[in-house]
Amino acid sequence: MGRDVDTTVAPDAATRERIVDVDGLTVIHQRRGGGRGERFAAVDGVSIHLDAGEIVSVVGESGSGKTSLAMALTALGAHTSGRVELLGRDLSTLRPRQLRALRPEVQVIFQDPHGSLDPRQSVKAGFKELRGLQPQRTSWTDDAGLLAQVRLSPDLLDRYPHQLSGGQAQRVCIARALLMRPRVLVADEPTSGLDVSVQAEVLRLLLELRDGTGVSILFISHDLSVVRRISDRVYVMRRGTVVEEGLCAQVLDAPRHPYTRELIAAVPGQSLGRRPRIALEDLAQGARSSGRAVAS
Ligand SMILES: Nc1ncnc2c1ncn2[C@@H]1O[C@H](COP(=O)(O)OP(=O)(O)OP(=O)(O)O)[C@@H](O)[C@H]1O
């Protein structure tokens, strides 16, 4: 298959800490528009897990329930039944104060970085506000160090969101998430609005952060070519259920479920199977050629 080296499970996989453990999760929503209170299961009995340092993708077409699933992990989204454990703690058993204390452990990066940033706030002012909310968690690095971690120059600290490119704004969003020192990053279509070259840079950055900090990443995407480049494991969702799961190469090179095959067949050029996963050597290369600040 030609991808056997970098898609195998790491030797220590069996001993990795389980960070997220979801069992039989169901998320019921009220149907939007005209349904007169009709309820439906956006997520229907889904079980997934995420271990320390893993990048796990949830793929599926629009409306398959990916975001509803991911939001249940943050303890912010609705979660109707099933068990969600974060760092070994069952969210349904926690008091509001305990939930609040656990929330910084899961940070979310969204598709539209400009929409996630306050237009009236400079990058520096945004960091300051976050530091005020969680002084203990956020005191580990200064603002310049934080930007260096996402390969941005400290010159950007005084900029406002409209003065940032899409790629820079997404890096600022990632830096804001990192400020909380989370154990889990939920990246919900984080590269969908970006140019292809900027997309590749953001993917490299996520891989590098995982390798450097051990953060686990739940990557939500409908774009299989992106998923191919970043994931250790993949869950395929269709109409609220997981229809297939496995190592990235297994699922994308030898799909078992007809729906997965359909998704793969829909990728333009069907070059999916030949695309190499971004390797660590590329990271150094990318950082050098981009000429941006490199983390110390
Ligand atoms: N808060 C909500 N209230 C009512 N319906 C919702 C809510 N959130 C999502 N839905 C509906 O639930 C279904 C699953 O949506 P969800 O966003 O979880 O899927 P998705 O796979 O992430 O799709 P997309 O890629 O388009 O975001 C869709 O039909 C959506 O319209």
Image: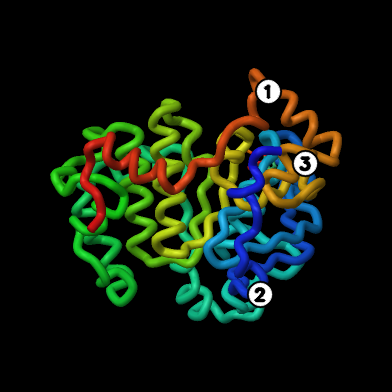
The amino acid beneath tag 2 is: Ser
Q: Is residue 28 above or below residue 285?
A: below
The residue beneath circle 1 is 270
Residue 92, label in figure: 2
> What residue appears at the point 62 percent right and 71 percent down from the top-left corner?
18
Label 3: element kind: strand
- CA distance for labels 1 and 2: 43 Å
Of residues 29 and 267, the one nearer the viewer is 267
How far across and how far down the image is residue 212, in percent? Answer: 39, 60
How far across and how far down the image is residue 174, in percent? Answer: 38, 51
For marks 3 and 1 on the same chain, the one whose residue lies earlier in the sequence: 3
Residue 238, label in figure: 3
The amino acid beneath tag 1 is: Gln
Of residues 124 and 289, the one nearer the viewer is 289
Residue 83 occupies which quadrant of the picture? bottom right
Report the side of 106 relative to 223 (left or right): left
Query: For the residue carrying disc 2, how many other residues have a C-alpha within 10 Å: few (<14), some (14-19), or many (20+)?
Result: some
Task: Tell which quarter ligand 1 is in.
Answer: top right
- Image depth: mark 1 or mark 2 in front: 1
- CA distance for labels 2 and 3: 26 Å
Of residues 284 and 256, the one nearer the viewer is 284
